[in-house]
Image (tube, rainbow, N blue to C red):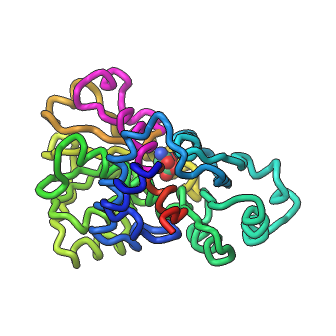
């Protein structure tokens, strides 16, 4: 434990904020602090006791596999325990309890909350009514900061550096919260962006304007063949966010990476927050380009670093 603490303090992990709500709250130093700490956490992946006696509550009001399980795995590897739900219909929410009350009650039973909710801003609201740390595991179409940190960790681990890269983002850039968080974090780095989306699913203008203000070179690409990138970040179409399912049907299946399209991508690494639907053919999985399963694994050390930091065990 002493060794873990010393290593993490040496990498300014302890300076990171209590609540992790939006990637907008991070500057480059803080992002790099998390990435370094995650690297250290890999040495303790088999287990440590720095969060012994602490309890994580996972409040998942929306479906989740990777985020939920990797947070749980991370907490247990740090020596802590986990309580929570992944189906709000089995909780008092079904009786009409407000989010604020659910959070206030959860505070009585735990030391830290990880929350996923369909409403934009729900994690911020949760943090406002509790004194224990709150981590946003995705709020509506808004933000998914911990996914972004593991995305950056994967890029850095695989390519050595984030600066100097050309990063492509392909898919539902309008409703996908992972790309919203990722593009904001990338604006701290010296990168160029190429974006490709079905019509009507482009990046929201508030994000592109922000990127341009930060002098990030951003190019809209019409066809997959026109992409020339080091990293291609693919997302699924966020069916559940469409107000009108007919609109979803119009864009469904409109892009797909296959072994054939890999010819255009050269050595680019392919990332995807997952789940995928039909946008990456499973035959691509065994190629050296496919990094998305490794990326999912990287969620564990990154979330170990975030839990340890948010719980402020340095005091
Ligand atoms: C993403 C999410 O929930 O936003 N999934 C995840 O956390 N890995 C992406 C998605 O659902 O498409």
Residue 24 vs residue 221, the one in the foreground: 24
Q: Position of residue 216 (x, y in %)?
A: 18, 68
Residue 294 sits inside the magenta stretch: yes
Residue at (20, 30) in percent of width and height: 262
Q: Which residues make up the magenta segment?
A: 275-302
Residue at (31, 60) in percent of width and height: 11
Residue 244 vs residue 310, the one in the foreground: 310
User: From this viewpoint, is residue 202 visible?
Assistant: no
Q: Residue furthest front?
A: 2
Residue 161 sits inside the magenta stretch: no
Q: Position of residue 147 (x, y in %)?
A: 43, 52
Q: Position of residue 15 (x, y in %)?
A: 39, 70
Is residue 191 positioned above or below 226 on the image? below
Q: Position of residue 118 (x, y in %)?
A: 62, 59
The answer to whether residue 310 is left or right of residue 187 is right
User: From this viewpoint, is residue 163 visible?
Assistant: yes
| Figure quadrant of residue 244 | bottom right
Q: Residue furthest right?
A: 95
The answer to whether residue 167 is left or right of residue 38 is left
Residue 30 vs residue 81, the one in the foreground: 81
The answer to whether residue 55 is left or right of residue 79 is right
Residue at (42, 39) in percent of width and height: 296
| Figure quadrant of residue 134 | bottom right
Is residue 294 positioned above or below 126 on the image? above
Is residue 15 positioned above or below 150 on the image? below
């Amino acid at each position: 434990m002493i060794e873990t603490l010393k290593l993490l303090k040496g990498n300014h992990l302890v300076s990171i904020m209590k609540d992790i709500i939006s990637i907008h709250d991070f500057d480059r130093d803080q992002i790099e602090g998390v990435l370094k700490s995650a690297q250290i956490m890999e040495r303790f992946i088999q287990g440590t006791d720095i969060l012994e006696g602490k309890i994580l509550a996972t409040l998942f009001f929306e479906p989740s596999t990777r985020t939920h399980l990797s947070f749980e795995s991370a907490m247990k590897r740090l020596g802590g325990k986990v309580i929570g739900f992944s189906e709000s219909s089995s909780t008092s929410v079904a009786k009409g309890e407000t989010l604020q009350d659910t959070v206030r009650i959860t505070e009585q039973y735990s030391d830290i909350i990880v929350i996923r909710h369909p409403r934009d801003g729900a994690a911020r609201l949760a943090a406002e009514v509790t004194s224990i740390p709150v981590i946003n595991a995705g709020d509506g179409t808004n933000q998914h900061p911990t996914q972004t940190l593991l995305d950056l960790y994967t890029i850095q681990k695989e390519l050595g550096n984030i600066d100097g890269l050309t990063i492509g983002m392909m898919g539902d850039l309008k409703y996908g919260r992972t790309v919203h968080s990722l593009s904001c974090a990338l604006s701290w780095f010296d990168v160029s962006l190429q974006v490709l989306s079905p019509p009507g699913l482009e990046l929201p203008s508030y994000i592109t304007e922000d990127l341009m203000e930060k002098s990030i070179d951003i190019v809209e690409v019409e066809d997959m063949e026109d992409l020339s990138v080091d990293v291609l970040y693919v997302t699924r179409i966020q069916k559940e966010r469409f107000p009108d399912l007919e609109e979803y049907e119009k864009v469904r299946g409109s892009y797909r990476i296959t072994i054939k399209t890999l010819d255009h991508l050269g050595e680019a690494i392919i990332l995807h927050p997952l789940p995928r639907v039909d946008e990456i053919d499973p035959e691509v999985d065994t190629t050296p380009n496919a990094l998305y399963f490794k990326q999912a694994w990287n969620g564990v050390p990154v979330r170990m670093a975030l839990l340890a930091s948010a719980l402020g065990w340095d005091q």
